[in-house]
Image (tube, helix red, strand yellow):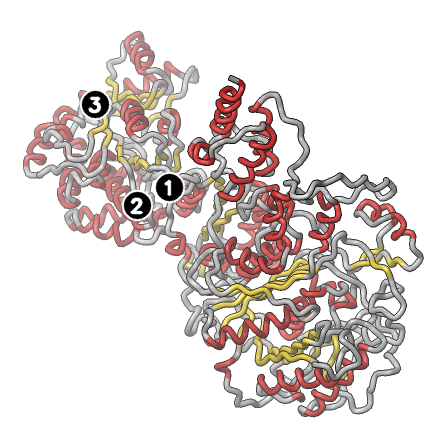
């Protein structure tokens, strides 16, 4: 068939931008869809032991009419309550449907490329759930503390589920509970569409859940809708009813006109929807009405402004009942035929045959499956079908039943209908269409991807290095996130620019973090799977640590040392500004040395070029890092790096710094040549060895207790190195002169003259000085000759770092320059250290890896500046896997044990738990904290409110304390002394006063 020619007004179309589900069957949506095409059935037949363990009474499990089958949801009781900052005890009391809705809502927003808690979109919430069997189980148990009643009600009743999702996910649009029995969540979709068209919100989240507690089978009753055989066979001759299922689903909706080329491609488009009620013109309250169903389908087609001939698939309500199926078949056939559908042109599907009836979530789950049909162009089989129900009217019916997966052969664009009918007669129907074709990348919106960088060797495009940033709420979840992305990269080989942009712009930055760089999907997948070449860290909950910038000096230079930093936005601009401050011939030579890997190393190792080149790359990299959001709290440089540090701190104007560093290099190069040797030993010990061997060497630098640099004539340095051998670490620096030694003294007059032309300004940042090893505070005027005498004096870098550690406690050291020569000294001084440049250890890497490491430690990196804009893509959602959480009150006693005798209760008695008063207030208060807050590992100084308590919970705590200790503690005092030790002390004081 060809494309449908249409002049529809698309201004009322609604895009489905994100979906998520927890349904019986495979957990991943791709695997779940594959199972649909294979005709799999995801129900479970329970053993007697499983039924008894779930809490099914033994007599019921043994009843011959009991059918032990359900669409089973694995790990139904797991909930990542810490992720949503919900106390463990509160989580136990929440109906699993409330828990699932939080998780699938989060995943659906992620899938839509909209970070939850982002706040940029006004998002409304429409939520539906099945009546809480979990609540009934807790009430039946008889041990429910009346003090918990508010938590129980808020965690189980439908009234609170939408507002809970809005609160926990930071959504600011209207939040509604929608309850119309089996049609609830599809009615919710209709209402969400109307809200979007009416301007009530920018985005709508529809979420539904269905669950019967305990998760088990059902008692078949003759004439009822529940299957006697435990198999749901919609429209089949042997259909005998439905089985129950457990699960949840969510969709995210936006106006199609608001979807940009940078958003993920929608799953499909809602063209129109309708809802109605059968009214009283039917056999009974529970009976379906063909007339009502026909009207709602016709109204939806009319709202969609499409004819029935354009519909190629119908996701039916499909309960698999002998009478209900023919009623639905007739209604759909009549409505579609009347709207122009040809005989046998509409394939019928019924999700209940696969996973059972999800009740309130059935509609949204069916919508999700229908969206996958129109997106993929493949129609799944109606599973379990053998031959048609004899009551189906098949003559001239547009409907047909597919018995195997078949490609779409109907009209284009692909369109489908979705039906849901509720007990009591509230009907809903949605008409959907495949998403309109996207503009190809490279034209219009979404064309902001950076192109591959040409390879210098072959001229062919070489993939650029990409920075992948992942986060999670806990370390185990971070591992699951990394593994999930690795598998996705291997399987789909997506565009890495889209992957990185999605992770930055479509995912929130959580506390546990991982960063990795790579150039291809395969390379990134390998590194993620093996955790090789990755940085991991935790963002401090108190905010980012202060940062100290460290700048290396002579001896660290290498050809093309600027190349790794070009990955930083703003670096090239900053470098151009810096080089413009040098004289033209010198600037050209510096630029060549910074970018040419074949530049003569001997020339670069001489001070006249090394020092300006190091200054230029360090200053530009610092400017780029500050542009990304990392601002130093203090600075320190080593040798010539101190000029860079002072410039960043505002002591030198850029032009003055360039002039002075150029003169410094020239003047030192005019001095007699020498050499420097790094020695892994205490400076006194290193000098003693030189004196013992008759070698006249000077101390160029003291970098730490066991690290120094000696300098002097090259032959004496060589002799020292030979004599030391392998008794301790020694390394000759790549430098032609012996800085900070007596050989440099001839340079001092020229430097004094150069400094006379420069006006030094007070620093605007603390700066740790080489000459004193001390920190000077902002506003301090530095002596004019300090940067001259510094050339000759020993660099007291270790002492400077120690002073910085005292001045900026808890700081993070960031080394800005080639390699990481200063990082070991910083770590020895107690600083966590990050070197921006890792190319020496990992050839081909850029400074992105260093910036990624800073982000993992909580630094405020402007992540979007590193990845750019561009189209967001679909990636694996957050892998929730919390602890098992079931309220003890909901657990049934052993199936064969006698029921406990009822306890007498006096009128008006407050049913507090009957716990004997403890002898020791510390034991009792600690236990009450544990019971109310859901854990028992609190430190003595734990703050009740920081641990999840609130005003309601503190009131319950006070009541418990008063009851168990027979005291009356003041509310104000418990609020003021809010730690565990504080509460214990309050009880001790009041008990002591009472005893006296």
Image-based side of 910 in relation to 968, left or right: right
Q: Give the mark nearer the N terminus: 2 vs 3.
A: 2
Question: Which residue is located at x 30 percent, y 9 percent?
Answer: 688
Spot occupied by residue 653 in the image (x, y as percentages of width and height): 15, 43
Residue 372, above or below 912: below
x and y percentages locating residue 383 in the rendered image: 80, 69
Which residue is at the front of the view, 862 or 643? Answer: 862
User: Of marks 2 and 1, which one's residue comes earlier in the chain?
Assistant: 2
Which of the 4 quarters of the picture holds residue 367? Answer: bottom right
Secondary structure beneath dot 3 equals loop
Mark 1 or mark 3: name the one nearer the start of the chain. Answer: 3
Residue 735: image location, x then y, percent? 28, 31
Q: Is residue 656 left or right of residue 191?
A: left
Quarter of the figure with the N terminus: bottom right
Tag in front: 2 or 3: 3
**Mark 2–mark 1 CB contact (< 8 Å):** yes
- Find disc 1 in the rendering and name its residue: 836
Q: Quadrant of residue 850?
A: top left
Name of the residue lying farthest toward the right: 64
Residue 382 visible? The answer is yes
CA distance separating discs 2 and 1: 9 Å
Q: Is mark 1 in CB contact (under 8 Å) with mark 3?
A: no
Q: Is residue 18 visible?
A: no
**For the residues marked 2 and 3, what is the alpha-carbon distance in whole angstroms?**
27 Å
Between 796 and 581, the one lying in front of the other is 796
Q: Is residue 873 above or below residue 256?
A: above
Which residue is farthest front?
Answer: 907
Q: Residue at x 25, y 16 (%)?
A: 697
Q: Circle 2: is it few (<14), some (14-19), or many (20+) Cα within 10 Å?
A: many
Q: Where is mark 2, residue-wise?
A: 621
Q: Residue at x 70, y 81 (%)?
A: 279
Q: Which residue is mark 3?
A: 772
């Amino acid at each position: 068939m060809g494309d449908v020619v249409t002049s529809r007004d698309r201004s009322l179309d609604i895009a489905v931008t994100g979906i998520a589900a927890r349904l019986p069957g495979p957990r991943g949506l791709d695997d779940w869809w594959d199972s649909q095409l294979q005709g799999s059935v995801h129900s479970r037949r329970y053993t007697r032991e499983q039924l008894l363990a779930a809490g099914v009474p033994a007599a019921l499990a043994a009843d011959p009419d009991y059918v032990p089958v359900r669409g089973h949801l694995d790990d139904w009781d797991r909930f990542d309550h810490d992720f949503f900052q919900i106390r463990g005890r509160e989580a136990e009391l929440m109906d699993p449907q409330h828990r699932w809705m939080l998780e699938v809502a989060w995943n659906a927003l992620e899938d839509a490329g909209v970070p939850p808690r982002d706040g940029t979109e006004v998002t409304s919430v429409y939520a539906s759930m099945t009546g809480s069997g979990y609540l009934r189980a807790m009430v039946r148990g008889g041990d429910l503390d009346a003090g918990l009643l508010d938590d129980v009600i808020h965690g189980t009743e439908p009234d609170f589920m939408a507002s809970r999702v809005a609160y926990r996910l930071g959504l600011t649009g209207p939040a509604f509970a929608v309850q119309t029995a089996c049609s609830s969540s599809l009615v919710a979709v209709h209402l969400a569409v109307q809200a979007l068209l009416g301007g009530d919100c920018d985005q709508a989240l529809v979420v539904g859940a269905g669950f019967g507690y305990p998760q088990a089978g059902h008692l078949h009753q003759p004439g009822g809708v529940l299957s006697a055989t435990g198999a749901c066979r919609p429209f089949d001759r042997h259909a005998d009813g439905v089985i129950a299922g457990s699960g949840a689903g969510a969709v995210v909706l936006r106006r199609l006109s608001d979807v940009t080329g940078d958003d993920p491609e929608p799953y499909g488009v809602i063209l129109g929807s309708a809802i109605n009620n059968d009214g009283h013109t039917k056999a009974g309250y529970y009976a379906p009405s063909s007339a009502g169903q026909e009207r709602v389908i016709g109204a939806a087609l009319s709202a969609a402004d499409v004819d029935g001939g354009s519909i190629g698939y119908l996701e039916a309500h499909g309960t698999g009942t002998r009478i209900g199926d023919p009623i639905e078949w007739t209604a759909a056939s009549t409505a579609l035929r009347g709207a122009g559908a040809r005989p046998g042109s509409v394939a019928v599907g019924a999700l209940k045959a696969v996973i059972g009836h999800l009740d309130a979530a059935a509609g949204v789950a069916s919508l999700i499956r229908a969206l996958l049909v129109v997106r993929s162009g493949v129609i799944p089989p109606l599973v379990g079908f053998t031959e048609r129900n004899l009551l189906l009217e098949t003559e001239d019916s547009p409907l047909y039943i597919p018995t195997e997966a078949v490609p779409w052969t109907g009209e284009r664009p692909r369109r489908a209908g979705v039906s849901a009918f509720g007990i009591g007669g509230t009907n809903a129907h949605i008409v959907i269409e495949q998403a309109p074709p996207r503009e190809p990348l490279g034209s219009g919106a979404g064309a902001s991807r950076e192109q591959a960088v040409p390879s210098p060797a072959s001229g062919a495009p070489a993939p650029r290095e990409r920075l992948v940033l992942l986060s999670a709420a806990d370390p185990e979840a971070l591992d699951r996130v990394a593994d999930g992305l690795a598998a996705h990269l291997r399987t789909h080989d997506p565009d890495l620019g889209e992957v990185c942009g999605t992770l930055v712009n479509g995912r929130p930055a959580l506390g546990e973090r991982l960063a990795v760089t790579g150039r291809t999907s395969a390379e990134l997948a390998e590194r993620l799977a093996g955790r090789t070449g990755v940085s991991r860290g935790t963002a401090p909950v108190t905010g980012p640590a202060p940062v100290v910038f460290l700048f290396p000096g002579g001896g660290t230079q290498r050809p093309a040392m600027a190349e790794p930093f070009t990955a930083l936005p703003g670096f090239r601009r900053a470098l151009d500004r810096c080089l413009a401050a040098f004289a033209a011939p010198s600037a050209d030579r510096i630029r060549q040395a910074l970018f040419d890997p074949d530049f003569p190393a001997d020339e670069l190792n001489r001070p006249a070029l090394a020092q300006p080149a190091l200054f230029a790359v360090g200053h530009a990299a610092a400017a780029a890092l500050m542009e990304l959001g990392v601002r130093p709290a203090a600075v320190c440089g080593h040798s010539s790096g101190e000029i860079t540090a002072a410039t960043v701190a505002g002591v030198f104007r850029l032009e003055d710094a360039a002039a002075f560093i150029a003169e410094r290099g020239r003047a030192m190069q005019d001095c007699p040549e020498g050499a420097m040797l790094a020695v892994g030993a205490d400076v006194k010990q290193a000098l003693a060895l030189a004196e013992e061997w008759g070698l006249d060497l000077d101390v160029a630098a003291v970098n730490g207790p066991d690290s120094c640099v000696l300098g002097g004539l090259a032959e004496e340095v060589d002799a020292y190195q030979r004599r030391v051998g392998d008794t301790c670490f020694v390394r000759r620096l790549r430098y032609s002169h012996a800085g900070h030694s007596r050989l440099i003294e001839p340079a001092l007059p020229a430097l004094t003259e150069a400094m006379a032309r420069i006006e030094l300004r007070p620093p605007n940042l603390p700066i740790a000085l080489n000459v004193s090893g001390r920190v000077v505070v902002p506003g301090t005027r530095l002596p004019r000759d300090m940067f001259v005498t510094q050339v000759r004096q020993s660099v007291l870098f270790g002492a400077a770092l120690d002073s910085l550690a005292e001045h900026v406690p808890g700081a993070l050291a960031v080394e800005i320059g080639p390699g990481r020569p200063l990082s070991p000294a910083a770590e020895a001084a107690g600083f966590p250290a990050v070197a921006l440049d890792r190319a020496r250890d990992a050839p081909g890497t850029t400074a992105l890896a260093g910036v990624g490491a800073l982000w993992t430690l909580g630094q405020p990196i402007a992540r979007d500046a590193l990845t750019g804009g561009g189209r967001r893509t679909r990636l694996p959602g957050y892998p929730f896997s919390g602890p098992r959480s079931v309220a003890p009150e909901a657990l049934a006693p052993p199936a064969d044990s006698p029921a406990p005798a009822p306890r007498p209760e006096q009128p008006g008695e407050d049913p507090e738990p009957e716990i004997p008063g403890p002898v020791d207030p510390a034991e009792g208060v600690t236990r009450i904290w544990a019971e109310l807050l859901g854990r028992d590992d609190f430190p003595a100084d734990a703050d009740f409110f920081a641990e999840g308590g609130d005003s309601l919970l503190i009131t319950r705590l006070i009541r418990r304390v008063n009851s168990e200790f027979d005291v009356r503690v003041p509310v104000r005092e418990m609020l003021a002394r809010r730690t565990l030790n504080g509460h214990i002390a309050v009880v001790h004081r009041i008990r002591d006063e009472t005893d006296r």
